[in-house]
Image (spheres, rainbow, N blue to C red):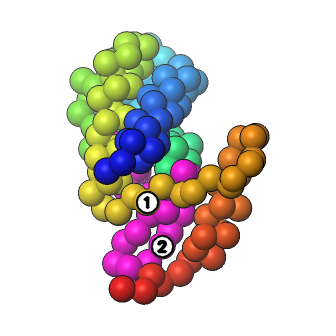
Amino acid sequence: MNQRERVIRSNAVIDLKIALSIRVKKQQDTYARITRSKRQLPSVDKMEARAIDEMSGVLARSFAPFALIQNGDAHHWQASRQTVHRTLAAVPIEIRVALAGRRSAGADAIAERIFKAVDTDFRLIPLSTIPGFTGYPRWEDIFQQEYGVQRRLQG
């Protein structure tokens, strides 16, 4: 793994941590199964499932700088959403409560778990940047240019 790839991977984990940390407090509480009366629910309910679904869409976007390769097919960040969803649902309640309590350890632990899960399900290939472009990269355009909508890779 070269220096550029390490930096992009590190930035993706940082993006996940930030996205987790700035989630709306109510959404974090719901994810941690904490009710308005600050009681903790013993099992999954509809609100928790909705919070996981909403969070997985936002967090999956952290994989925009990558082509996700699975079984020879190139996918963009949207393909990681199911893995992110599954990982969020599997996070132990203690870590969720730490996240809801705004402790960075919760965001760190969840971000690392998500990145490892996506890295396990897909081969992450950093997208190239456009030479001479100085603004924020438009990853969708770059992916489209390099891989097309979804392309079967040769070899």
- SS at mark 1? strand
Residue at left offset 68%, top offset 47% = 137
Residue at left offset 60%, top offset 70% = 146
Within-10-Å neighbours for mark 2: few <14, some 14–19, many 20+: many
Residue at left offset 57%, top offset 57% = 128
Any mark on residue 125, and which?
Answer: 1
Residue 100: percent from the left, percent from the top?
41, 19
Write down the residue under mark 2. 74
Residue at left offset 53%, top offset 81% = 151
- SS at mark 2? strand
Quadrant that contains the C terminus: bottom left
Outermost residue toward the front in this view? 132
Q: From this viewpoint, is residue 134 visible? A: yes
Instruction: Pick the residue in front: 141 or 89.
Output: 141
Q: Check if mark 1's residue and mark 2's residue have beta carbons within 8 Å.
A: yes
Residue 75 magenta: yes
Instruction: Pick the residue in front: 86 or 128.
Output: 128
Vertical arrangement, residue 68 with respect to residue 104, above or below? below
Residue 83: percent from the left, percent from the top?
37, 56
Amino acid on which disc 2 is placed: Ala
Residue 149: percent from the left, percent from the top?
62, 75
Residue 66 magenta: yes
Vertical arrangement, residue 144 with respect to residue 153, above or below? above
Q: Which residues are magenta?
A: 64-89
